[in-house]
Structures are given as C-alpha cells and as structure tokens.
Image (cartoon, rainbow, N blue to C red):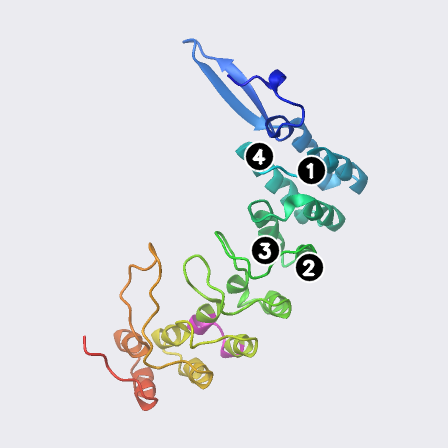
Amino acid sequence: MFNPATMPSNSPDVLFARTESFTLANGQQVLSSSVSPLLQQLEDACQTGSPGHVGEILRQITPLPSDIPMTGHVALQKCLSTAVTHQRRDVVRAMLQNGFLRPNVSEIGIKTAFQARDTSTLQIFIDCGWDVNETGEGMRPLLRHAVNDATLRSFLLAKGASPNVENNRGITPLETAAQSSPVEVVRELLDHGGDPSKDDSLIMAAESGRIDVAELLVQKGANVNALMKDLPLPYGQRTRMTALDAATSNNHLEMVKWLESHGATARNL
C-alpha cells in the first residue's frame, strides 16, 4: 500500500499529488488522490503572487519529471491557464522556461490565450519555443479555428502558421475556409502558401456551390478531377468523391457547369 512517509520528498507522488488511504466500513482499503499543497500554492501564486514567489515554487518542482501523477498533471495545466487568464505574462514566461511548454501541459494555456484573443501571451509561447503548427488533439493546429478571425488569423500566418497542416481529423485550414469563409480569407491563405493541389479545398467549395472560391483554387493548381483524399479511421468512413460529384449531389447546377467548363469529367462508377 502507498505510504507517503516512505516516499522521497522529491518524489512526483509527493511534489505533485497527495495520496491518502481510507478504510471503509467493510474493511476495504481505498486510496484517494488530491493535488499537493505545493501545487495549490502555485495556482494561488499564478493568480496574485509575486514573480519571486512563483519562482520559489518552480525551483522546488522543476525540472518536471516524466512520471507526474494524473492529478498533478491536471493541476499543472490549471496553474498555467490561471496565469494566462490573469495575464500574468512574466509568470507565464517563467513557467514555460521551466518545462511547462510540453504539449500535454501547455495545451490548455494556449487554448485559453487563443480564446481570449490574447496575441501578446501567444507571442510568449512562441518566444519560448511553441510551434504554431503543432498538431494533436483538441484545437491543434490553431489556424483552422482562426480562419474567420482577422486578428488571430493574421497573427498566426505572420508567425508561420501553415494553411496546409491537417488536424487529427485530416482537415486543413484551407479546406475549412474554402467551405464557408469569405473569398478574401481564402485568398489570404493562398497568399501564405495554401496549396489546393494537396487537399480537398476545391471539393469543399464545390459542395457549397462557391464558384468564386473555386476559381481561385483552380488558378492556384487545384485539380478539378481529383478524388477526395483517403482519411485514416475513424474519419475515413465516408464516400470519396470529386468536386463534380459534390456539386451534383448538392444540386449546385451552376457549379456543375463551371467545373465541366474547366475540364471536370464524370467518373465511371
């Protein structure tokens, strides 16, 4: 059975989580895990404490080990997001410079800054080594979620965000914009390296009947007869189609005519 008294004082199970044993009425022993007092202090300091106080706590818990208990792991995420929420940018920088940049710790902090449209804090993440094209679960990469926000979109593009990076479902920012964003947004993404020959952006535009967007995409190299890309499971379970298929199935007759005038041909199914 776990006994805190037998653990080294610098053990992850002591620094990041507190585990206690309880005996039920039937005699069964149950373990309960809670956030360590040290991380509770860090969360409070991230909100109102001085940078010096935060630094004192960071020196006790860093470098962050790889085997942090889940309870402590969640607490670290919360500490960073608390500092972001309260715009404690000096604290955010100190935390990122002490191991909080790893994706499974920084994700919520980045999301918090993004949702607040706080580009100053996002810049700190970048300064500390965050890759704006980072992929993974949740909202990564961020550009896809910023296509209709001029401030965030321009900021991310200026920092090297790629319109061609897929999220975990295989969708690119360019595809997202082609489906529903103003044509000026699509043009901006194309001007920043968007490549419609490598994704399904033309099919997305055809599905929505957007001839003005389709014209831009074809000018930039989109293949009017390209077949929808094959996505990995579980997202690959869909009927793959061409732009002409998409326009026809959605009864966008003008789009059908436009595609045919640009060389689209019906498939032999």
Give the x, y percent position of residue 61. Answer: 68, 34
Q: Nearer the viewer, mark 3 or mark 4?
A: 4
Mark on residue 68?
4
| Circle 3 Cα neighbour tier, 10 Å, few/some/many (<14 / 14–19 / ≥20) | few
Q: Is residue 54 above or below residue 171?
A: above
- 3 or 4: tag closer to the N-terminus: 4
Q: Is residue 82 above or below residue 117?
A: above
Give the x, y percent position of residue 127. Answer: 70, 58
Mark on residue 123?
2
Q: Is residue 149 above or below residue 192?
A: above
Give the x, y percent position of residue 50. Answer: 80, 40
| Circle 2 Cα neighbour tier, 10 Å, few/some/many (<14 / 14–19 / ≥20) | some
- 4 or 2: tag closer to the N-terminus: 4
Q: Amino acid at mark 4?
A: Ile
Q: Nearer the viewer, mark 3 or mark 2?
A: 2
Q: Which residue is mark 1?
A: 62
Residue found at the very far bottom of the displayed protein:
261
Residue at image location 49% in from the left, 52% down from the top: 138
